[in-house]
Image (spheres, grey):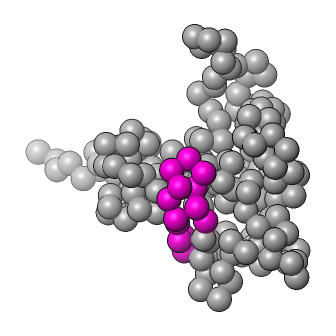
Amino acid sequence: MRALLSVADPEWKSLVLFGLYTGQRLGDLARLTWSNIDQVHDELRLVTAKTGRSMIIPLAAPLRKHIDQMALSDDPATPLHPRAYATIDVQGRSGTLSRQFAELLSQAGLAKKKPHRKGTGREVSPLSFHSLRRTATTLLHEAGIPQAVAQALIGHDSAAMHEVYISVGRQALEKAVAALPEL
């Protein structure tokens, strides 16, 4: 994360922070305006493009701190991430933003410049902006957050889909083996 943030400009840093601390998709985060931020209740409110699901997400303290440092607009329709918003507005999808994020991953030394191709020629990479969604899910589980709560926060409609997003990290494995008794 630090390597990625070190090469990102302020808008991409913001998108990465929103991705990590909300677990939401790039397209949905690119569409955010100040009207989506409820600063009184410390909540992000949005409707996801993929599922049409209404989401109310409490703001994590680091994300709230970041939002407080952003230039607040008097117009609630002002995008939080103007370049990303304009790209989505013109193109209607997040493909260009995904490619820009892949370039950031490459600059950070986290991914190869040219991802391999799969099937129909679509470029895929093991890392993408969607990896932040998986990371958020895994971090919630490793912190002991109940599955139902993590699933609701991320916005997964089923437990089966949610399970696909959970990875077991090194720290969780070390904690598990440390809990084994000595014989």
Q: Residue at x 43, y 42 (%)?
A: 165
Q: Residue at x 81, y 40 (%)?
A: 91
Q: Residue at x 60, y 71 (%)?
A: 45
Measured as percent of width and height from the top left, residue 126 is found at 59, 27
In-front residue for pair 158/1: 158
Magenta stretch in the rendered image:
46-58
Q: In the displayed structure, would residue 166 be above or below residue 22? A: above
Q: Would you say residue 63 sits in the magenta stretch?
A: no
Measured as percent of width and height from the top left, residue 118 is found at 60, 13
Measured as percent of width and height from the top left, residue 97 is found at 78, 40
- How many marks do you count on the picture? 0
Figure quadrant of residue 130: top right
Left or right, 157 with reference to 27: left
Measured as percent of width and height from the top left, residue 147 is found at 32, 58
Quadrant in which the C terminus appears: top left
Q: In the displayed structure, would residue 101 be above or below residue 46? A: above
In-front residue for pair 53/5: 53
In-front residue for pair 55/43: 55
Q: Would you say residue 52 sits in the magenta stretch?
A: yes
Left or right, 179 with reference to 4: left
Q: Residue at x 81, y 71 (%)?
A: 77
Work out whether residue 99 can be spotted: yes
Left or right, 114 with reference to 59: right
Work out whether residue 101 can be spotted: no
Q: Which residue is outermost to the left?
A: 183
